[in-house]
Amino acid sequence: MEVKASYNDLRVSPQKVRLVVNEIRGYEFAEAVDLLKNIHKKSAKAVLKTIKSAAANAKVFNPDIKESDLYVKKIFVDAGTVWKRFMPRARGKADRILRRTSKLTVVLSDE
């Protein structure tokens, strides 16, 4: 059985989130949660929240399932919407600032 959870418009760039995501790919649920609690990055909290949400989804679909049976089958990050902002510069010019967001998707499985 596979369950899925996603986090859209995470206010961290995809490049930074991928650093955290690559550390927990393939781990069991409990190990992944322990690792994420010890990673001191803003995106680690969001990844932890999403993994816990996927585990809760698994409980809803199959109440008999144990968290010890789950593992991270797939986890990936895509680019979300980019917020465009401008910063005033000298002589009436402006520079564009790109505020990047991420889409995080987690798939847990018990097989």
Image (cartoon, rainbow, N blue to C red):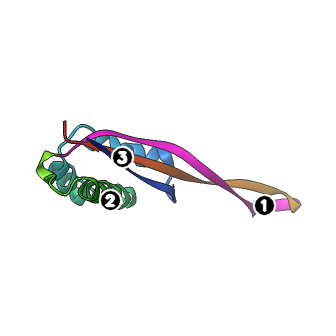
Residue 16 or 32: which is nearer the viewer? 32
Left or right of 107, for residue 35: left
Which of the 4 image quadrants contains residue 44?
Answer: bottom left
Q: Which residue is mark 2?
A: 53
Label 3 sits on a secondary structure element that is strand
Q: Position of residue 52 (x, y in %)?
A: 28, 59
Q: Quadrant of the N terminus?
A: top left
* Amino acid type at image mark 3: Val
In the rendered image, residue 77 lying in the magenta stretch gets the answer yes
Q: Nearer the viewer, mark 2 or mark 1?
A: 2
User: 10 Å neighbourhood of mark 2: few (<14), some, or many (≥20)?
Assistant: some
User: Mark 2–mark 1 contact, CB under 8 Å?
Assistant: no
* Amino acid type at image mark 1: Arg
Magenta span:
70-91
Query: Which circle's residue, 3 or 1, is located before the other in the chain?
Result: 1
Q: Position of residue 90 (x, y in %)?
A: 81, 61
- Going 33% across and 61% down the picture, which residue do you hit? 49
Q: Position of residue 26 (x, y in %)?
A: 24, 37
User: 10 Å neighbourhood of mark 3: few (<14), some, or many (≥20)?
Assistant: many
Distance from label 3 to label 2 (Cα)? Answer: 9 Å
User: Mark 3–mark 2 contact, CB under 8 Å?
Assistant: yes
Residue 111 or 27: which is nearer the viewer? 111
Q: Residue furthest right?
A: 92
Q: Which residue is mark 1?
A: 89
Q: Quadrant of the C terminus?
A: top left
Distance from label 3 to label 1 (Cα)? Answer: 41 Å
- Up the image or down, 38 lies above or below 31; here it is below
* Amino acid type at image mark 2: Ser
- Going 55% across and 53% down the picture, which residue do you hit? 101
Left or right of 73, for residue 27: left
